[in-house]
Image (cartoon, rainbow, N blue to C red):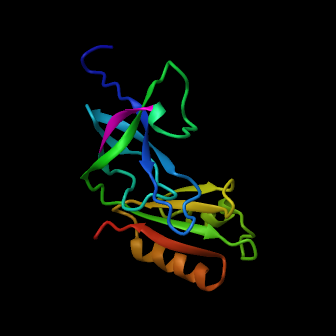
Amino acid sequence: MDATEHRTRRVRIRFGLPAEHGWAPSAAEWLWAEEIAAGTYTILNAPFFQYDIGVGDIVEAREQPHWEDAWDPFFRGPEEPHHLHYAGLAVDGRHDTFRAVVLQDGAFEGDPQRASDCFHGFGLWVEGASWFPNPMFALDVPPDADLDAVVALLERHEREGAWMWEWSKRSGR
């Protein structure tokens, strides 16, 4: 690698989740991130469960041994004895994040892919998850997207019984 190349490290960061009213269905959520400096990372994907974190946020994380977790689905054995644990938000990336549970008896029949297709053409990142008891999708809205139009579409389909949604991170724009 020469001096003009910049090699980044893509990592997973563990976010501990509180158990409130039986939600979320996991004790932790793992988000992809890119290392930008020692201990500092840019979030690359929208969370399904973590509040107040979104794509583009710069976060701090610290290494923690795997054995500190009662159960770690990402443990890869002795070659990866540590994982990164969220330590705090350093810089807000100004993205909004939404999540929606797709209702089985709604217009999209519980299919998060069909539901997320509504947002095609908005310039958004959408990820569906059908493996949860209630299929859902996470929606990243970058600063240059039409936030009012996105919220209007979310509200319309909620009124029609297609999904239930919430704003999991507000950018303050």
The N terminus sits in image quarter: top left
Residue 72 coordinates in the image, percent (x, y): 54, 38
Left/right placement of residue 138 relative to residue 6 reads right
Whether 151 is drawn above or below 16: the answer is: below
Q: Nearer the viewer, residue 106 or 64?
A: 64
Magenta span main SS: strand
Q: Nearer the viewer, residue 79 or 58?
A: 79
In the image, is residue 166 part of the stretch drawn in magenta?
no
Whether 111 is drawn above or below 26: the answer is: below
Whether 157 is drawn above or below 93: the answer is: below
Left/right placement of residue 46 relative to residue 106 reads left
In the image, is residue 62 part of the stretch drawn in magenta?
yes
Which residue corresponds to the image point at 67% horizontal and 64% vertical from the top-left? 134
Residue 65 coordinates in the image, percent (x, y): 41, 30
Which residue corresponds to the image point at 51% horizontal and 19% vertical from the top-left? 78
Q: Quadrant of residue 2?
A: top left
Left/right placement of residue 15 relative to residue 121 reads left
Q: Quadrant of residue 114?
A: bottom right
Numbered-mark total:
0
Q: Quadrant of residue 25?
A: bottom right
Left/right placement of residue 9 relative to residue 160 reads left
Which residue corresponds to the image point at 46% horizontal and 76% vertical from the top-left? 151
Residue 168 coordinates in the image, percent (x, y): 43, 66
Which residue corresponds to the image point at 60% horizontal and 85% vertical from the top-left? 159
Q: Nearer the viewer, residue 11 or 172?
A: 11
Q: Which residues are magenta?
A: 60-65
Whether 120 is drawn above or below 12: the answer is: below
